[in-house]
Amino acid sequence: MATILEQIDQQLATIQQDERWRQLPAIENAKNRWMTFNGKQLLNLASNDYLGLADSPVLAQAAQAAIAEYGTGSGASRLVTGNNDLFTQLEQELAQFKLQEAALVFNSGYTANLGIISAVAKRKTLIFSDRLNHASIIDGVKLAGAKHIRYRHNDMDHLESLLEKHRDIDNKMIISDTVFSMDGDLADLCRLADLKAQHNCLLMVDEAHATGIFGAGRGLAHALGVEKQIDLHMGTFSKGLGSFGGYVAGSRKLIDFLINTGRALIYTTGLPPATIAANLAAIRLLQQDASAGSKLCDQAVALCHKLQQQGINTGASASPIIPVILNDNERTLQVQRALIEQGYYVGAIRPPTVPVNSARLRIALRADLTSAELQHFETTILEQICN
Ligand SMILES: Cc1ncc(COP(=O)(O)O)c(C=O)c1O
């Protein structure tokens, strides 16, 4: 039996052999669409700051004003003294924005999923979860100790057959991303809502990549008009909203339950006031004008179409996340390096983040690109892949 350190050596050796070695990229600055990497200026097509709000002066001013008024840290967990009226305002406005009774902020999208699922699900709960759901959902299910039943990606017939099989069990929950983070495709929320109603389960969605983009910024559930049929609307401020922190919106009862039992809320210091103020500013910006998200989706669909016409596999993407599925790990890294040479930074995603033999470039299109930049990127990526 190997010691822990011997096991670690073995694991690291395997990771290297499989070309799955990860290291933190030496990014000097990635404040807006331009990033500086190894001294070179690159167009950043890898971040989730889809709307460019991470560099919005409106958010920055809100954050600075909050530091001046409230200080840099919240000092304690929210149930002790870490709460302040910025949280109250944010949660009220967020609940209205999401057309739900109440909302609750968590310290990140990751901890929101951990906190919600581990509070709501018990050991005997059956959790039906899309096979491509985000890692934070999987970790939440593990933490809950619940029974995890994974259905084939976006396969509603498969989900239905699994629900039928377990029809005698009352304690059931369905969880799905709405926009899948590594594929950019969309969940069939109408069918999920029907199945939830037929089988009397709790339905939770993760709108991390849909917030700010679909449904006038409110999410895919709103775009499809099924927001009232979903019990828990989880999302994050860290992607399209350009800031940081997770959230959930739902009924007053569910939010009260999470405040009382959600360990990921109870046992951690509240987010800094600057972050809460920036989140509030982002929600208000979207309420004034949320047109950037749908325009961005149109641009993404057009780019996908051009890539597909050249025989490039972009899966079923229907969002600003465009996977260019090259399958091979080394080839993916090689094209990523070539694009860096040409002035573009796109993500190179390899197993275990995606299934074996499905390594891909992950293009995250953003709303602050000029049409000349977009056009030049399109030409460059086609040259790099097709030549
Ligand atoms: C679908 C999904 N859910 C949750 C998260 C976690 O959100 P955060 O980055 O705010 O912790 C992510 C982020 O990668 C995500 O893609």
Image: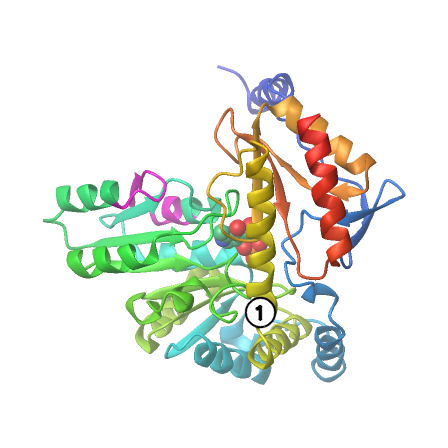
What colour scheme has been applied to the protein in the rendered image? rainbow
In the figure, is residue 360 to the left or right of 138?
Answer: right
In the image, is residue 144 part of the stretch drawn in magenta? yes
Q: Which residues are magenta?
A: 140-156
Determine if the magenta segment contains residue 189.
no
- Name the residue rendered at 76%, 59% in the picture: 32
Camera-side residue of 121 and 26: 26
Which structural element holds mark 1? loop
Residue occupying the point 50% across, 43% down: 183
Q: Which residue is mark 1?
A: 270
Q: Is residue 265 visible?
A: yes
Q: Position of residue 113 (x, y in %)?
A: 44, 55
Q: Position of residue 273 (x, y in %)?
A: 65, 75
Q: Residue at x 67, y 28 (%)?
A: 386
Q: Amino acid at mark 1?
A: Gly
- Residue positioned most to the right: 39
| Nearer to us in this view, 254 or 249 | 249
Q: Is residue 236 left or right of residue 95?
A: right
